[in-house]
Image: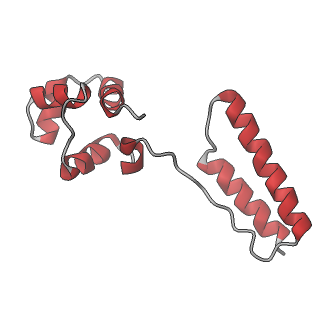
Amino acid sequence: MHDFGAYLRKLRKERNWSQQQLANLLHVTDATISKYEANTAIPQYETLRSIASIFNVSMDDLYGMKRQGTVSTHGLSESQIESLKALIEAYRLKNAQTGKTLTQEQFAILGRIVAELSK
């Protein structure tokens, strides 16, 4: 389960901000920030949007959702699709071993490969 409070604390500490400094930016009290970080209170939607904006993260990040990329196989032959699946699986295996998810750059590379294969 996603720990919003720990994630918020991490974001705040990365900027070396106190709870009061973040509270001032969000127009709430430092006690409210403390409750968010302790997971005893949940920010309202507008406050979550402000948090996302302040820390330049997505709402998905705040909700603990993993980003999922997709690659279209439209127009590819079965053998091209199988090759692409093998490549994707190799990326995933490598990232699983290192504990990382696929980056946007990796998805872009896969997209370029698909474009080349579909010519």
- Among all residues in the image, which is located at the extreme right? 79
- The quarter of the picture where the C terminus appears is bottom right
Would you identify the image quadrant in which residue 35 lies?
Answer: top left
Would you identify the image quadrant in which residue 110 lies?
Answer: bottom right
Q: How is the image coloured?
A: secondary structure
Above or below residue 9? Residue 74 is below
Above or below residue 67? Residue 10 is above
At which x and y percent is residue 46?
19, 52
At which x and y percent is residue 79?
91, 65
Above or below residue 53? Residue 11 is above
Q: Is residue 103 left or right of residue 17?
A: right
Residue shown at 72% from the left, 42% from the top:
92
- The quarter of the picture where the N terminus appears is top left
Residue shown at 76% from the left, 68% from the top:
115
Residue shown at 20% from the left, 29% from the top:
40
- Among all residues in the image, which is located at the extreme front? 1
At which x and y percent is residue 38?
24, 24
Instruction: Count the marks.
Output: 0
Q: Is residue 73 left or right of residue 63?
A: right
At which x and y percent is residue 97?
71, 29
Q: Is residue 102 left or right of residue 22?
A: right
